Amino acid sequence: MALPLSPGVYIMHNKNKKIIYIGKAKALKNRVSQYFGSQQNHSEKVRRMVENVDYFEYIICDSEFEALVLECSLIKQHTPKYNILLKDDKGYSYIRVSDEKWRRITHELQKRDDGALYIGPYMGYYVRKSVEEANKIFMLPTCSRKFPEDFGKARPCLNYHIKQCMAPCTGKVKFSEYNESVEQALEFLKGGSSESIKRLTREMDEASESLEFERAAKIRDKIRAVKRMSERQKVVSVNVPDQDVIAFFSDGERGCYYVFRFEGGSLRDHESFIISDDSCEDISEFILSYYSMRLDAPKNLTLDTLPDDSEALEKWLSEKRGNRVYLSAPQRGEQAQLVAMCKKNAAEALAQIKGRTSREYSVLEELKNLLGLSKIPEYIESYDISNTAGDENVAGMIVYENGKPLKSAYRKFKIKSFEGQDDYASMAEVLDRRFSEYEELKETGEGFGRLPDLILLDGGRGQVSAVATVLKKHGVEVPLFGMVKDGSHRTRAITGSGGEISISSRRSVFTFISKMQDEVHRFAIGYHRQRRSNSAFRSSLTDIEGVGAVRAKALLKHFRTVSNIREADLAELESCPKMTRDTANAVYNYFHKKYNDDQE
């Protein structure tokens, strides 16, 4: 299909003629061609989408802005599978003002046809909290009493005594005073703390000038309460303007968009949106979807990455807001720190789904970027060889899952195919046995039936080359690297087929790799020492006729040392548990014959 270089919207269908993706382009030919060219530069999600495209159509528009508006409309209408879709009913809340003379303000999740005034919808946890704070600050009742029916029927509750309710139930509160507090609370909820403080300050000054000192004192207390709440909500300096901050974090399988909403220098709301692996990672799509659901748009929108169509997005958001909206992606200063904090929260939100911390997630993401992996390495296997001049040649395998040691998956190997010292051949044998097991168990997806996301070998380019041949033999494609140590046996770099990668300047990755290299070395050398100890044990006791592992342990438990066994007489040996007369004679003769031979 010949495509024009004009702005427009492209619509992709699968073989069932269902729309699976809608996108916009400044130049249709250039954008659509990118999907069907080389797949190497695409993420796994985009490759999966392209595989499902049977045909596509397009609509030409007069401008990129017009294409953006049309794209937004079509996505809402068709909800394609591969577009970022945020459900319209996710987390909506309303502020309800009851339809009665003595009005009440409450937080509601649903809008009902009950004659009450509903303000919203709003998204996020903060609506309920804000309503609670407003009722406390302006001393409005939250009990179930009815007014004026319940005036004077009971004593005021605890909230009155801790100055969180003006207690209209006493019948001593003027309706005008109560109604004024309701209006002040609504203004606080609609306009925020900064606007409330300005208005309350004006009212306090007016009351003072009119010599209404008692009323002025009450307003002063409200101002203090608003300021206290505002101080608790601040996370950065008051220099932060009214703005939204959006950052994205992905582990290669899922992604998370995180949103900070600031007002008057205070964080008023925060939201997270987990994007499935079927959704394309497109910040423009997210912005369109997110602000299509909202009633307003921010004056400033700060992003971790500025999209190519930022001018069109600015225009669309400006029309929605009614005045100019500014998009930015700061690289330094306070705003850049704000974006970094937002991204850290996105990582934390994604980490909680998989039971890890943001610190573990961050180091795995850094490792992914350092090694050029396609996704975060959640399951890492590491190997090391241990021997003494070729004697008792063994290997250890450790596993890290989600950045933590998974000790139940650790494995030990005794080198079987040869004797002597050859670390390259040893490493090749171990990985060959490991992936032979994989071929048998891959249907289970457990143990050796699970492919790692990354293999790290204790060693340099030689070990990597030896194991790369094994992976090729088994048809396994797993990222493979070696952990290189310096002359002091400390981790220095990571090596792969493309050469060494320095990690000394990347503190979190350096610490992570060093710990893993130390752990696999400890595990392998521990197994080697165990083998050497067993070998020495076998040579001194189990070589005796009639003495196996059980009797050898019984002898050591009874006599405590081999030296005591050697010095024991025949009667003492016969009295040992699990011993027979013939075996006692064999032990006695073995040590005394050995002693006599040594003397000769």
Image (tube, rainbow, N blue to C red):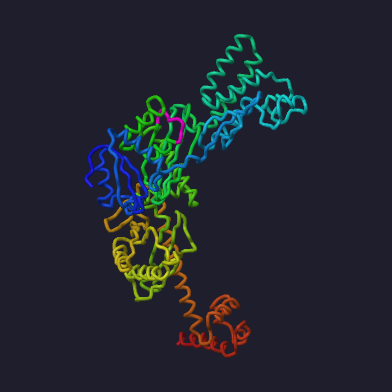
Residue 223 percent location from the top left of the image: 58, 22
Residue 286 percent location from the top left of the image: 40, 40
Residue drawn at x 28%, y 48% is: 35
Residue 560 in sight here: yes
Considering every residue shown, the one lying at the far bottom of the view is 582
Residue drawn at x 36%, y 42% is: 282
Residue drawn at x 35%, y 76% is: 417
- Looking at the rendering, the stretch of residues picked out in magenta corresponds to 293-300
In front of the other: 434 or 596: 434
Considering every residue shown, the one lying at the far top of the view is 210
For residue 131, which quarter of the picture?
A: top right
Residue 331 in sight here: no
Residue 293, compared with residue 496, is above or below; it is above
Q: Is residue 451 left or right of residue 107?
A: left
Q: Is residue 169 left or right of residue 370?
A: right
Whether residue 253 appears in magenta in the rendering, the answer is: no
Residue 336, compared with residue 396, is above or below; it is above
Residue 528, compared with residue 341, is above or below; it is below
Residue 396, compared with residue 85, is above or below; it is below
